[in-house]
Amino acid sequence: MTLSQAEFAFVSQLVRREASIVLAPGKEYLVEARLIPVARAVGAPSVTEFLADLQRRPNPQNQRKIIDALTTNETSWFRDREPFAALTDVVLPELVKSRAATRKVRLWSAASSSGQEAYSLAITLQENLPPGWSYEIMGTDISTEMVKRAETAEYSQVEVNRGLPASQLVQYFERVGAHWRITQSLRRNVSFRLMNLTAPLPAMQPFDVIFLRNVLIYFDVATKRTVLQNVAKLLRPDGWLFLGAAETTIGIDDNYERVAAGRTSAYRVRTGAPAGAARRG
Amino acid sequence: MRAMVIDDSRAMRMILKRIVTKLNFEAVEAGDGREALDLLADMTEVPDLALIDWNMPNMNGLEFVTNVRADPRLREMTLVMVTTESEQSQIVRALAAGAHEYVIKPFTEGAMIEKLALLGLVPTGANS
């Protein structure tokens, strides 16, 4: 049974309000599929009754569970490959020159979900930075559940099959019962925190590279612009922003320019962009 | 492109055959490593890819990989272990013997396609 229009409208408004995510009509089936385990976990007999109860008696904890269920996505290691190849072949060689004084780079996996992207970045840096260099990776997500999962750094057999070369599995993971855990040598460079990209972002050291992939697709144009403006404040003036293959800043935020990076594109803040756009750090 | 599916389970051979056929491979099957080597000996054109179970009668997957690696005629073949053997030490052994990749059962079709994409045998994003 698919959700009624009224139920779908209730969920849409909730995630729009709390997470700025637009659920287009036609996603009823997806929403229901994601909410079935949530309803079951709280002991509701069905999604319909779970939603009806939530409408009668608003409960922030259960609202949070809905947002978590609808904002988390299945993800794989080195997803799409090309941005990671561009990082290795184009971005890191440039950073190795420009950051020679500090020998340190900072990367941000914005919307890090269960952590695969952040740890894929860590593996890439571990293998490609010259000896004596260090790196920090921050992963952020709007879902508390996902931040916890990413910190745990444990993945099932099925998850480690997804796009991870076997040679890296044996090098950067250790078996923990039926699961695989990222080794401490990688984990110590990666941290995670809860963050809503559409709200004003906390003050942080700026980043050399930001992966903001497959995030903007969920937002309307005004929210996309807000997110891009927020992110620009945390990108070093000569930093690099990677978006998902179906995403762009073009027509949304002209402070960015698209540049070729290997076989894909990245975005950099234009020289002379207004104050506030990538000017800190 | 041609693929060889080597597994003593007929059901698993069917699953793997269906995946590689969808990716435009022409598939041949073998029920164990020995049968696979016999088939290869008669082939004029060596397959591009072999998907290899570990535990099989007559000749297991690891022995098959070792035999293939010792034969210069078969050096272009890409070897992927597809097995329930999931110990770290087993993966290391298979890679050391010459397997290019390792897929742990159970796997999804998408995961298999991603592994083949890693090896350059199908385009990246072929399963999206």
Image: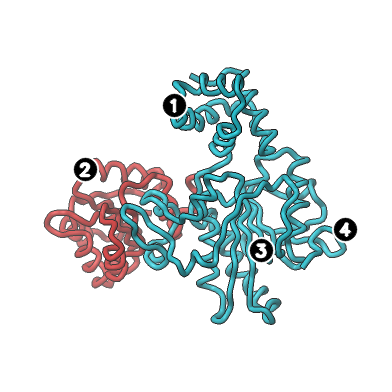
Which residue bears the numbered disc 3?
A209
**Snapshot colouring:** by chain
Q: Amino acid at mark 2?
A: Arg
Q: Disc 2 designates what residue?
A: B10
Image spot of residue A69 (x, y percent): 53, 37
Q: Is residue A280 left or right of residue A21?
A: right
Q: Closer to the camera, A23 or B110?
A: A23
Mark 2 lies on a secondary structure that is helix
Check whether the beta carbons of the residues at disc 3 and disc 4 lie within 8 A of each other.
Answer: no
- Residue for badge 4: A274
SS for dot 4 = loop
Q: Which chain hosts label 1?
A: A
Label 3: which secondary element: strand
Residue A158 vs residue B52, the one in the foreground: A158
The 10 Å Cα crowd at callout 1, few under 14, some 14 to 19, many 20 or more, is few
**Chain letter of the residue beneath label 3 in the structure image:** A
Q: Chain of mark 4?
A: A
Question: Callout 3, which amino acid?
Answer: Val
C-alpha separation, residue under disc 4 versus residue under disc 2: 65 Å
Question: Could you tell whether A135 is left or right of B75 in the image?
Answer: right
- Image quarter of residue A88: bottom right
Residue identified by numbered label 1: A43
Name the kind of residue labelled 1 in the image.
Gly
**Mark with earlier residue (4, 1):** 1
Nearer the camera: disc 2 or disc 3: 3
Q: Which chain is cyan?
A: A
* Colour given to chain B in the rendered image: red
